[in-house]
Amino acid sequence: MYKSTRGSAEAVTASKAILKGIAEDGGLYVPDYIPTIDFNIDELAKLDYKSLAYLVMSKFFTDFTEDELKACIDKAYDSKFITEEITPVEKIGDTYFLELYYGPTLAFKDVALSILPHLLKTSVKKQGIDKNILILTATSGDTGKAALEGFNNVYGTKIIVFYPVEGVSIVQKLQMVTHNGDNTHVVAIKGNFDDAQTAVKNVFTDDSMQKSLDEKDYVFSSANSINIGRLIPQVVYYFYSYISLYKKGDISKDEKINVVVPTGNFGNILAGYLAKNMGLPIDKLICASNENKVLYDFITTGTYDKNRDFFVTNSPSMDIIVSSNLERLLYFVSGKDSAKISELMKALKTNGKYEITEDMKKQLCDFYGGYASEKETTDEIKALYDNYKEIIDTHTAVASSVYNKYKAETKDSTKTIVLSTASPYKFPKAVMNAIDEKYSSLDEFELIKEMDKLSDYKIPASINGIEHKEVVHTKVCEKAEISQVVLDYLK
Ligand SMILES: *Cc1c(COP(=O)(O)O)cnc(C)c1O
């Protein structure tokens, strides 16, 4: 069963938690306990991505039948990913990069958002609900398009994506505003991602909105990583990458590895934490931030403080100051003390900050926090290109740069996987200018063509010629207008 981190909502089954997205008391759903997997690597090594996905997800989605869950997995992990492996691992220098961007929208969000609509539809059926679903999603850049793609023309669903007017890259924005689907709607919000996420969370838990929606025969759900249906599918590739290294003979049985995760809302790295607690031999979880380094400060001091300047960086999908999923980690490291979590979250809401106890701090020892400045990020892109002729995106570069600092500081030589979260084609300007100043006079679309010339990884079809596609979404709203936008859309 799934409980709220804040303790005052009823415990629910997985399908109900997926359907609701967020608990009624504003907390996030967490499983009663973290299930374990019998870690027999030679047996696991025989599984392909889908079979492994079934093994991992069946431990969490316990009220789904085998047929139901397998059908969801089959529909999700097919030829919409350009590699059969779904999430291949590449070695650059001494470091492994887990490439998570071969799905339809070129970022790791595709791995979870290609299955979430199927999990949700199955959940509706299981719960015997005779209503349509309205997905509300705030995006820092990548979730939006991945959710539009995932829910496109899914019968019985509508989706509204809110993106911050300033912050997302030009390619990210075009991917969203040119998206044409009968059930999809995209709105720019005046503010940053945190504003969008807070406003959307408020709409979810607003009683009068719930009522209005009910009258129109809709229920809300979320495609953000606050939804366990988003989070759990991400656990799979941690197992998959470890097994890939083992199969290549790069690690021995039970050898521990580190993972480095470029982090924003703390969803991806929390999936890594779950994998570790399920029995995967992970040693350190290295949390990499950009200049919005609230998580670095938190991990090093035990105080979370959102009262700070917000920076628009060249890794916009990580420009986040209120990391929602951290609440789930706090729940586990407090020994599932939901009263404590309510207290901390109340402090966050009223004072913008909280401090965890010494005991909780000790439980964070698996985590290492680091951050990279804008210059360190672009230097890392250049270094990997100059040394290996490999092109990585800005988010991956944040992680890679933090890993270099970690190695220099700790002398830890444990084999390490850096999560490569987006395709460099989504951020052509930042990436190409990092590689060579001579590109600074070219526009984004010329740069995409230049990138193609430098790389074996050719322009993905989904963004080739995107500058010529018709813009179909032009609406801009204030954050206070979100409820009205939702109601208007349902008219
Ligand atoms: C969303 C995103 C991140 C941050 O992931 P979280 O789960 O929010 O921590 C990092 N990189 C890219 C490219 C992203 O789209």
Image (cartoon, helix red, strand yellow):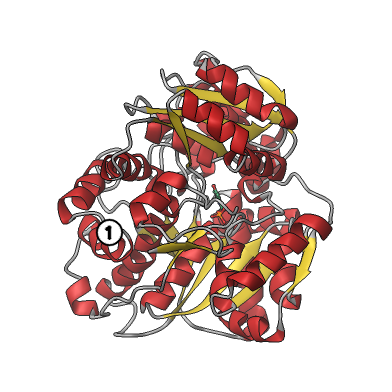
Q: Residue at x 16, y 68 (%)?
A: 46
Q: Count how many numbered circles sit on residues in the image.
A: 1
Q: Residue at x 50, y 53 (%)?
A: 389
Q: Is residue 437 above or below residue 302?
A: above
Name the residue type under label 1.
Ala
Task: Pick whichever, 426 or 274, lies toward us.
Answer: 274
Residue 345 visible here: yes
Residue 95 visible here: no
Q: Is residue 336 left or right of residue 183?
A: right
Residue 352: give x, y in percent of width and height.
Answer: 80, 58
Q: Is the CB of the residue bearing disc 1 within 8 angstroms of ligand 1?
A: no
What secondary structure is found at the residue carrying circle 1? helix
Task: Pick whichever, 157 or 315, lies toward us.
Answer: 157
Residue 166: give x, y in percent of width and height.
Answer: 72, 33
Could you say which quadrant of the image residue 27 lies in?
bottom right
Where the N terminus falls, by quadrant? bottom left
Q: Is residue 297 left or right of residue 387?
A: right
Q: Is residue 277 above or below residue 146?
A: below
Q: Is residue 250 above or below residue 125?
A: below
Q: Residue at x 41, y 17 (%)?
A: 182
Q: Is residue 326 left or right of residue 86?
A: right
Could you say which quadrant of the image residue 43 lies in?
bottom left
Could you say which quadrant of the image residue 201 lies in?
top right
Task: Pick whichever, 478 or 52, lies toward us.
Answer: 478
Residue occupied by mark 1: 53
Residue 483: give x, y in percent of width and height.
Answer: 64, 28
Q: Residues within 10 Å of mark 1 (few under 14, many from 20)?
A: many
Residue 283: give x, y in percent of width and height.
Answer: 48, 81
